[in-house]
């Protein structure tokens, strides 16, 4: 049989290590091992009942057909109202595009705006799909360091030094995966100024916007003039525990929305009709905000369990994340390399976590833990990690020179 010849662009496409580690964990579980899952970034809660019921009602009512490519008009209207409510920016339904999962917006934006050889600024550490998709379309991802010493906020001075004549797009993520960092109002103001000055288009990924632990979420889209040079990217997956429903939404200049409509026609045709109707309930249902608040309170408790647990481990220090549901502890003082520790924790301690370097070179020396898991499971995970690191430290002082170990 002749070998398949893949297009060169396939070699430029990366992956999300969460899915790889999950597959490894599932193999161990199939062999009878018990694993605490702290790798996957998916809320463990059920979708709030009122939203599920709205989806079922829509299906029974015949929402089983294609819809317009950018979404059902009434749903685009409800989404525009939601965006306006959350950001304070008057937003028209014509500016809204609904997609089957928000990550489509990253791909579509790059296809629409970026030429091969252009540069795109991406957070490092950051959500791995950004750099992967930038490379996929033939452009160059330029990492913007996100530092623990800056409380995982982006340093705007450093950012501005990275803008070149080839820079087309700046990708922001607040609250951020994997660090839990959030942009402050002054950061957003300075970024907006830079975007205007250097004619940058901004993709602002705000999928975790409802998950902020102190103060309020500040949207770069809400800065003066930014709605004209920004895609606000958001979706149902995280705030309403709806990852499997697959619905993302973007607010953007109308001319770009029209191009995204064409991209939708050529790819998915549309997001699922019943999912779109469920979104209206998520945005406007009387029970929905209460459900989000209940989940948020639970996430706060879980965050504290994980951050306290991590800070008690030898060689580990962890800042309390300001948003999202990820902890990003520094593990340099354990002496472990992050990928080796990821593997050892899974195989020897039964705890699935991710190496920080899977999120970019600046993530080295860290782990990412998702605390979208129950408090008892998180406590089990913390106990296992603490025991493992204590024993490994004891072993290391007794036996020197073990491969990969401190
Ligand atoms: C920062 C970030 N953006 C986007 C996504 C994708 O979300 P969706 O389910 O809407 O495709 C994720 C999922 O983990 C994420 O962490």
Image: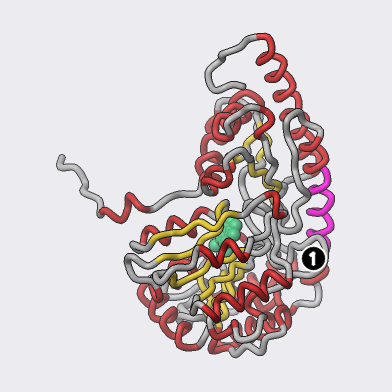
Q: Above or below — where is 38 with respect to 132? A: above
Q: Above or below — where is 42 with respect to 100? A: above
Q: Which corner quadrant of the image does residue 349 belong to?
A: top right
Q: Bounds of the magenta span? A: 292-305
Quadrant of picture, ligand 1: bottom right
Q: Above or below — where is 68 with respect to 36? A: below
Which of 230 and 50 lies nearest the eye of the viewer? Answer: 230
Which of 324 and 102 lies nearest the eye of the viewer? Answer: 324
Q: Residue at x 78, y 30 (%)?
A: 383
Disc 1 element: helix
> Residue 34 appears at what percent x and percent y?
66, 29
In the visual, does 273 lie left or right of 381? left
Q: Residue at x 25, y 51 (%)?
A: 6
Q: How many marks?
A: 1
Q: What residue sits right under mark 1 in the picture?
A: 291
Residue 244 in view (yes/no): no
């Amino acid at each position: 049989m002749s070998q398949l010849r893949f297009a060169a662009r396939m070699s430029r496409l990366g992956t999300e290590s969460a899915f790889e580690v999950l597959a490894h964990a599932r193999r161990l579980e199939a062999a009878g091992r018990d694993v605490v899952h702290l790798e996957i970034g998916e809320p463990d809660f059920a979708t709030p009942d009122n939203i599920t019921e709205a989806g079922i009602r829509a299906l029974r009512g015949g929402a089983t057909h294609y819809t317009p490519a950018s979404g059902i008009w009434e749903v685009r209207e409800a989404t525009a109202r939601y965006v306006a409510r959350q950001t304070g920016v008057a937003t028209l339904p014509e500016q809204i595009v609904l997609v089957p999962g928000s990550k489509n917006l990253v791909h579509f934006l790059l296809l629409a705006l970026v030429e091969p050889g252009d540069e795109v600024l991406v957070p490092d550490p950051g959500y791995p799909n950004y750099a992967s998709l930038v490379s996929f379309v033939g452009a160059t991802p330029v990492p913007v360091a996100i530092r623990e010493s800056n409380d995982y906020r982006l340093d705007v001075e450093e950012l501005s030094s990275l803008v070149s004549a080839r820079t087309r797009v700046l990708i922001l993520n607040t609250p951020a995966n994997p660090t839990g960092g959030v942009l402050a109002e002054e950061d957003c103001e300075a970024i907006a100024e830079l975007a205007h000055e250097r004619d940058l288009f901004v993709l602002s990924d705000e999928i975790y916007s409802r998950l902020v632990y102190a103060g309020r979420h500040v949207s770069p889209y809400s800065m003066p003039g930014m709605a004209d040079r920004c895609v606000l990217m958001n979706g149902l997956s995280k705030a309403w525990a709806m990852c499997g429903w697959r619905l993302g939404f973007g607010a953007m200049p109308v001319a770009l929305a029209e191009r995204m409509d064409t991209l939708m026609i050529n790819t998915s045709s549309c997001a699922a009709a019943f999912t779109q109707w469920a979104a209206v309930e998520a945005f406007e249902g009387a029970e929905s905000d209460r459900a989000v608040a209940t989940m948020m309170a639970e996430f706060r408790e879980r965050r504290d369990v994980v951050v306290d647990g991590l800070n008690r481990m030898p060689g580990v220090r962890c800042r309390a994340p300001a948003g999202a549901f990820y902890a990003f502890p520094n593990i340099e003082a354990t002496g472990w390399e992050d990928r080796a520790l990821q593997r050892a924790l899974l195989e020897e301690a039964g705890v699935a976590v991710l190496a920080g370097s899977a999120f970019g070179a600046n993530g080295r020396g860290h782990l990412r833990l998702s605390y979208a898991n129950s408090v008892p499971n998180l406590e089990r995970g913390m106990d296992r990690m603490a025991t493992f690191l204590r024993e490994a430290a004891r072993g290391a002082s007794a036996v020197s020179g073990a491969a990969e170990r401190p």
